[in-house]
């Protein structure tokens, strides 16, 4: 898209934001790519390009062989733990600060929205911030889990009961956390504008949230590269670099 086209669409999205009263942001992996975190499905770079997620990121894989599971997930945690928010996260923070959005629903587990300063964040796929013991309900912070992984190449164990810890993220084969999903559905239903950033909107049930907004008469805007199932229903789509696009929207406000 040309710079003129980008600026025009950015101005359209800015106008939608100014005219809304209950806007909400929904984010996926694409907003974190500028922070150096690969998305899941991009050819050549996606996380699942050379790994079968059902073999390494399924709840059954954790139950069957926690040590093998953590050999994969430990590398993922190490890769995520030192990443920092990028300019796209900062623009979302600024939109919240100005009262233009009510909150952020995110599919990301990287905790970068919170690190950037967003105050209302619904992490529908969980977060790397904690690991949990399913036997005694203990919660262990990321720093302690990373220390245990460095000390021994095996699953980190609960200090209270000795059971293997599970990352507090939604693995394949698990349901999304009920409270987080209920809050996300409430925000989506009440929204008069949903802005989807960096998501292909293909993974359900989160991919159904824009439909809740549309069904109640709200509008939809997309800031993402590649096609989505909602392209025809969106009021506007910005499909360039996510940082450039969001900076242009902020400038148009």
Image (tube, helix red, strand yellow):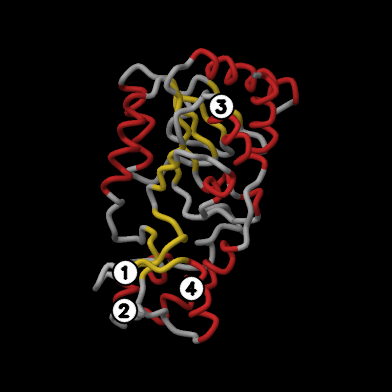
Secondary element under disc 4, as helix, strand or loop, is helix
**Distance between mark 2 and mark 3 Cα atoms:** 50 Å
The residue lying at 70 percent from left, 34 percent from top is 244
Numbered circle sitting on residue 138: 1
Residue of label 2: 160
The residue lying at 59 percent from left, 48 percent from top is 32
Crowd band around label 3 with a 10 angstrom C-alpha radius: few (<14), some (14–19), many (20+) = many
> Residue 162 at x, y = what percent?
31, 83
Earlier along the polypeptide chain: callout 1 or callout 3? Answer: 1
Numbered circle sitting on residue 237: 3
Total labels: the figure holds 4
Crowd band around label 1 with a 10 angstrom C-alpha radius: few (<14), some (14–19), many (20+) = some
Q: Are marks 1 and 3 in contact (CB under 8 Å)?
A: no
Secondary element under disc 3, as helix, strand or loop, is strand
> Residue 139 at x, y = what percent?
36, 66
Residue of label 4: 144
């Amino acid at each position: 898209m040309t710079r003129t086209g980008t600026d025009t669409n950015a101005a359209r999205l800015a106008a939608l934001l100014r005219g809304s009263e209950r806007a909400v942001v929904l984010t996926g992996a694409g907003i974190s790519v500028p922070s150096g975190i690969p998305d899941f499905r991009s050819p050549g770079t996606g996380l699942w390009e050379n790994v079968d997620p059902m073999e390494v990121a399924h709840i059954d894989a954790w139950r069957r062989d926690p040590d093998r599971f953590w050999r994969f997930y430990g590398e993922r945690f190490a890769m995520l733990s030192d990443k920092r928010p990028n300019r796209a996260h900062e623009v979302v923070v600024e939109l919240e600060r100005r009262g233009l959005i009510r909150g952020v629903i995110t599919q990301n587990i990287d905790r970068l929205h919170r690190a950037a300063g967003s105050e209302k964040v619904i992490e529908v796929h969980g977060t790397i911030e904690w690991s949990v013991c399913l036997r005694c309900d203990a919660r262990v912070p990321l720093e302690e889990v990373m220390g245990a992984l460095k000390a021994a190449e095996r699953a980190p164990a609960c200090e209270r009961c000795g059971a293997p810890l599970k990352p507090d993220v939604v693995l394949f084969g698990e349901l999304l956390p009920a409270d987080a999903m209920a809050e996300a559905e409430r925000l989506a239903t009440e929204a008069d504008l949903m802005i989807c950033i960096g998501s292909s909107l293909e993974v359900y049930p989160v991919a159904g949230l824009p439909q809740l907004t549309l069904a109640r008469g709200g509008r939809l805007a997309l800031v993402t590269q590649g096609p989505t199932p909602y392209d025809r229903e969106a009021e506007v789509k910005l499909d360039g670099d996510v940082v450039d696009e969001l900076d242009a929207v902020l400038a148009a406000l």
